[in-house]
Image (cartoon, coloured by chain):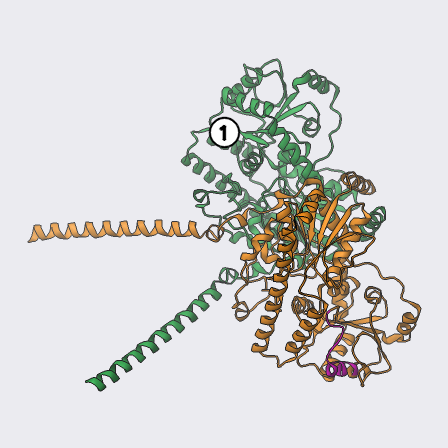
Chain colours: A green, B orange
Amino acid sequence: MHHSFSLLILSVMLLKVYAGKVLVFPVEGSHWINMKVLIEELHSRGHSIAVVRASNSWTIEEESPYYRSITVNLGRFDADSVSSFSARLLQLRREKNNFWTYLLLQMEVVEQLSKMHQDICNMMTLMFQDKILMNSLLDAKYDLILTDPAFGGGVFLARRLGLPLVLNVRWTDRAEAHFAIAPSPLSYVPVPGTELTDKMTFLQRLYFGPDVDYFSLFQDADIWLMRNDFTFEFPRPTMPNVVYMGGFQCKPSKPLPADLEGFVQSSGEHGVIIMSLGTLFSELPYDIADEIAAAFAQLPQKVIWRYTGPRPATLGNNTLLVDWLPQNDLLGHPKTRVFVAHGGTNGVQEAIYHGVPMVGLPLVFDQPDNLSRMNAKGTAKIVNIATLDRTVFLEALKEVLYEPSYRENMQRLSRLHRDQPMKPLDHAMFWIEYVMRNRGAPHLRTQSFRMSWMAYHSVDVILTLLAIVLIISLMTFSLIRLLCKRILLKNKIKHG
Amino acid sequence: MHHSFSLLILSVMLLKVYAGKVLVFPVEGSHWINMKVLIEELHSRGHSIAVVRASNSWTIEEESPYYRSITVNLGRFDADSVSSFSARLLQLRREKNNFWTYLLLQMEVVEQLSKMHQDICNMMTLMFQDKILMNSLLDAKYDLILTDPAFGGGVFLARRLGLPLVLNVRWTDRAEAHFAIAPSPLSYVPVPGTELTDKMTFLQRLYFGPDVDYFSLFQDADIWLMRNDFTFEFPRPTMPNVVYMGGFQCKPSKPLPADLEGFVQSSGEHGVIIMSLGTLFSELPYDIADEIAAAFAQLPQKVIWRYTGPRPATLGNNTLLVDWLPQNDLLGHPKTRVFVAHGGTNGVQEAIYHGVPMVGLPLVFDQPDNLSRMNAKGTAKIVNIATLDRTVFLEALKEVLYEPSYRENMQRLSRLHRDQPMKPLDHAMFWIEYVMRNRGAPHLRTQSFRMSWMAYHSVDVILTLLAIVLIISLMTFSLIRLLCKRILLKNKIKHG
């Protein structure tokens, strides 16, 4: 056994033939956090990286030891528009939870995503018109473009520069990423945004999928690095060029700072609850924050809550408000009992990695779906922000704290997630370097997207076969009628 | 980088927690050759293996250092029936190559496969009635069943013993393996046995797929170890529990025996041609052998031909007839120029591994499809056995010998095939041990096969939506008619 692994190491080392040049086109916010993980790893493996960022970027640093940045003018969207968008979404989520507010929310999301998409398109148009910039990008002879295709910019750029393309992807602004590439029977692959599972009733399946025209641009990608895996995702069809790297950003926890460790240890046998609603929702409307704080105050656990709004009046002595928390180190701490989160992909993957059950407050994007998956696997309780009060929230916390199945199920997911032939980050690196070594991966891309809708679904074939059956039936019928007539005629002549 | 790989080795070693017990239900012939590769590797990793074999088995040894055999009575099929079947198939293949002989051939294959399937069913019935045997199998507490599901026996046994199931699979007696599990749009996934590629014209797509009812038995399998990969196979939808281990049996070549090495070296700059038609067709009708020998005799290359029939009169001095040849060591020899083969999966994978272009003489089963894939990738020339004579065969040999693209394309496939994150055999071992560690892999199995055909294709949903549209249209129409009538009536009253 040792022998074959030495061989494996040797062959992997031999395959890494040269230092490549990677052009990264990222997306802001939490998407940038996980892209940085890939960039730092690429850098440590000797590749050189350039990152395209907008001049008004609010998360992508201009200076970095890991990459050279290419700052382009543009960006109608900035930190302010994003936080006002988040506030509006939160407001809609809170309004009475019926079908019409759901529809309004979805429309708002679609509208805002379209605006962001338009913003990126404007930025690309300006970039493409800047001949000096485009020539310098061409002259740099990058080996590939690595992009988060949520709004498409990097996909356009790859097409324009004629470069191999690797996607770091969870969703695009039209749908969950799989819908662009793999056959997705809507009967057992739930439509994104519906929070459904892979066991759907007839009524649930009565729902139409998104328009997929926009996807044709994405289907030239060489490799799809998908930010999930099948401990997280329901089993579903996939494609040879899809690499599941869910949890690639996860790592063992490091010791906490002394003061935080002291607070955590003071929880004794009861343990601690961690709460964070991610980068977009670090603030909350005051009345919600007050209900949440009141629920926490009634528990014997200690609570560490990432919250930047005004201090709630109901805040208990057991609750520590912080501007920022070392989420990975806290989730990996043996005293951590529950993770209260909005259900972003990064946080859910970290909870799976560390085996911490969740109470979910889903807000937008893929969050409701992510938490719906955790709920279906018995690892999370979901609280609707529209109906949240101290009683409801306290009940949810108590259920996940004291019903052992939540923890057991999450620990089982954690074991399965870690039980992989390669670490997800190494796997992602292998395929990025594979595309560089082999100048793309066309042999892993399906022919299917070059077909018309008619041909893909064999509609032409089926119609032709039906036509043949029809013609044969008609001919047979005519023949029989003709024969019958003749016989009748003969009989008439005979007997007549 | 070195650090992460040390971690990888450590984690793989930690994961291998105990020596498992594996019950193997193999298929005879070339299928047994590749199953033995898995058995020997499992043995070397400390697992204990038991193999179920029929008392009249002609390839599965009763005594072995690697496994304990469980010999069961039965087997109408033996070495003689297999070789008479092969002879009959060869005869049909040789008859004039029109649609009717193709149909006859396919019918013969289906009939014989059904007989073999029936044979296995009888064997299983007798096994299941043997209470002492069944109790001993239950008492042994195997961790999983590893089976080649070509004829289904091991699949029945796994269901009966309630054990996790791992398939070592290329095809089942109803279709290519993927058709049992992954969505297989017939528009770009060619129907097995048709030798089509993934670029099909309308006329080619006008062909119906096989009946898939039989597959429901297979869909409980935890892991499908597929004996191909995407250097060999066209890109197509796959499933999370399908592991591609194509080429798992391939290994670097060892030095040849001195006499064979001397013969190979005597070829000088011209190099050697290797010919073997596999275990089923080591003999050939005399006239075909004579044509083949005559073609070989006209070449400056040396030829090593695995052939057990009577010596052809036309045999040249450059051609060495052998009963058996070290195929892997010859394919890996730098003097080897062309591999003449029937296109069995094992041989094609070895040719890909060593980068040797092929002249293909496809006979039955998956052979025509395998060679059609190699032909589409520009790595093989196919000769139809029905029209084979010395001229045709010589032309094919010369084309592959002297047109550099064949070799270049095969060397490129070879590079891509070897460029994998893990060796295929290690990958297969990982997933077999994964099923043992986790007592199955239900979270990787799709829900889809538990659905009816109607529900899977959302026919119920579509019909309901159509019905709603129809009802609304009818109601609207009736309403309009009613209104028109009223207005007309009013007008009549007014003006009448």
Front residue of A253 and B241: B241
Residue situated in front as seen by the camera: B170 or A355: B170
- Describe residue B259's horizontal placement relative to residue B395 as left or right: right
Res B246 → quadrant: bottom right
Asked whether B91 or A244 is in front, the reply is B91
The furthest residue to the left: B496
- The answer to whether A262 appears left or right of B129 in the picture is right
Which of A238 and B117 lies nearest the eye of the viewer? B117
Count of numbered labels shown in the rendering: 1
Q: Magenta span has B291?
A: yes
Q: In which quarter of the image is the C terminus of chain A?
A: bottom left
Magenta region: which residues?
B280-293
What type is the residue that disc 1 sits on?
A: Asn
Residue assigned mark 1: A384
Q: Which residue is drawn at 67% across and 39% down?
A: A416
Residue A182 visible, this angle: no
Q: Vertical placement of A38 versus B454: above or below?
A: above
